[in-house]
Image (cartoon, grey):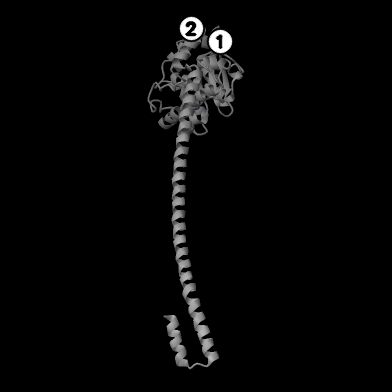
């Protein structure tokens, strides 16, 4: 089992008051799916075995940029989908532990919203804004570039993320274009405060891993070293056998072709021989007959000329010779 793309907890159009259906669908099926697949590939390349996504993130500086970017992309989106819900839920009560923590950290709920929105708006380029909790339950706001997050050992400010917003343009551009602030303002109307509160409670209890692990369904199977090798060997053998078989076929074909060529050559040669023989025979016949005839004729004529025999006698003599 590798890291698996989670299903959205609502339909693609369910948050359309804030995020349009097309953006949600592309964001989930292309971007998040892409991070998931590339993370699995990068983990396999690095020979990393069974690990939770949290374990990957907390020592991510030891791994390749591909692991860092895609582990972040995988985790951040898993969390992002869950902390949103159609129409949003009621904001935390001022009397609740979480409500009190917000006031203690930011002065008021409104101040918290402003600071969070400012962090989202001021993140240069692509990245995320976060509300995090320390292990003691103290809240703070931060932002990260690219797909980094506060769980990474390389993060400027480390903590447990309990709320986040994706401020990559792919998250809002179709509906808001350059108006990121409007997108952030809309985001507050679809926040699932129940889920955010659940994460805060887990952070305070220092039980953050079970919450996120069950969220991401994220366990990588151990590297199948031996089994894989066997399969590879089998494949190699099969492939070799195929090659040999192919070679044999080729050789057979070649032999057949050669045989054909030889046969053809033989036929040609035979033909040639026959033709030659015929020619020779013809020539021989020609030689045998013609020269003699001519010789006789010539000598006969010569004799006739010498002896002064009348033309009639010569003709008669010629006829005899020809016969
Ligand atoms: Mn995104």
Assess disc 2: are there few (<14), some (14-19) or many (≥20) residues with their C-alpha within 10 Å of its C-alpha.
Answer: some
Name the secondary structure under disc 2.
Answer: helix
Residue mark closest to the camera, 2 vs 1: 1
Quadrant of image for the C terminus: bottom left
Residue 273 in view of the camera: yes
Return the residue at label 1: 134
> Where residue 212 appears, x then y in whole percent?
47, 14
Q: Quadrant of the N terminus?
A: top left
Few, some or many residues within 10 Å of mark 1 (<14, 14–19, 20+): some
Q: Distance between the Cα atoms at labels 2 and 1?
A: 14 Å
What residue is rendered at 49% in x and 28% in y? 236
Where residue 149 sits, quadrant-wise, is top right
Label 2 vs 1, first from the N-terminus: 2
Residue located at (46% from left, 31% from top): 241
Q: Position of residue 76 (x, y in %)?
A: 50, 21
Q: Secondary structure at mark 1?
A: loop
Task: Answer yes or no: disc 1 within 8 Å of ligand 1.
Answer: no
Residue, disc 2: 97
Image coordinates of residue 163 in percent, x first then y, are 50, 17
Residue situated in front as seen by the camera: 266 or 65 = 266
Q: Is residue 241 above or below residue 308?
A: above
* Image-quadrant location for residue 115: top right
């Amino acid at each position: 089992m590798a890291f698996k793309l989670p299903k959205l907890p609502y339909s693609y159009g369910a948050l359309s008051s804030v995020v349009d259906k097309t953006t949600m669908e592309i964001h989930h099926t292309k971007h998040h799916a892409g991070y998931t697949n590339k993370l699995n590939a990068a983990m396999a390349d690095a020979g990393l075995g069974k690990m939770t996504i949290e374990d990957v993130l907390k020592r991510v500086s030891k791994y390749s940029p591909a692991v860092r970017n895609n582990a972040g992309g995988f985790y951040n989106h898993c969390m992002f989908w869950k902390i949103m819900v159609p129409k949003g839920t009621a904001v935390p009560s001022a009397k609740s532990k979480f409500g009190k923590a917000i006031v203690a950290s930011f002065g008021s709920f409104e101040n918290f919203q402003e600071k969070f929105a400012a962090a989202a708006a001021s993140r240069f380029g692509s990245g995320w804004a976060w509300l995090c909790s320390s292990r003691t339950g103290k809240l703070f706001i931060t932002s990260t570039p690219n797909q980094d997050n506060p769980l990474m050992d390389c993060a400027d400010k480390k903590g447990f993320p309990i709320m986040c917003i994706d401020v990559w343009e792919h998250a809002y551009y179709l509906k808001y274009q350059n108006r990121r602030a409007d997108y952030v303002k809309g985001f507050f109307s679809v926040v699932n405060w129940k889920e955010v509160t659940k994460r805060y409670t887990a952070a305070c209890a220092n039980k953050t891993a079970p919450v996120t692990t069950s969220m991401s369904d994220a366990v990588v199977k151990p590297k199948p070293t031996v089994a894989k090798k066997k399969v590879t060997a089998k494949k190699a053998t099969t492939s070799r056998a195929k090659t040999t078989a192919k070679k044999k076929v080729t050789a057979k074909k070649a032999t057949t072709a050669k045989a054909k060529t030889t046969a053809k050559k033989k036929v040609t040669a035979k033909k040639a021989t026959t033709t030659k023989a015929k020619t020779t025979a013809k020539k021989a016949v020609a030689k045998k007959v013609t020269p003699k005839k001519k010789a006789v004729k010539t000598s006969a004529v010569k004799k006739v000329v010498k002896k002064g025999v009348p033309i009639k006698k010569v003709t008669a003599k010629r006829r005899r010779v020809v016969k």
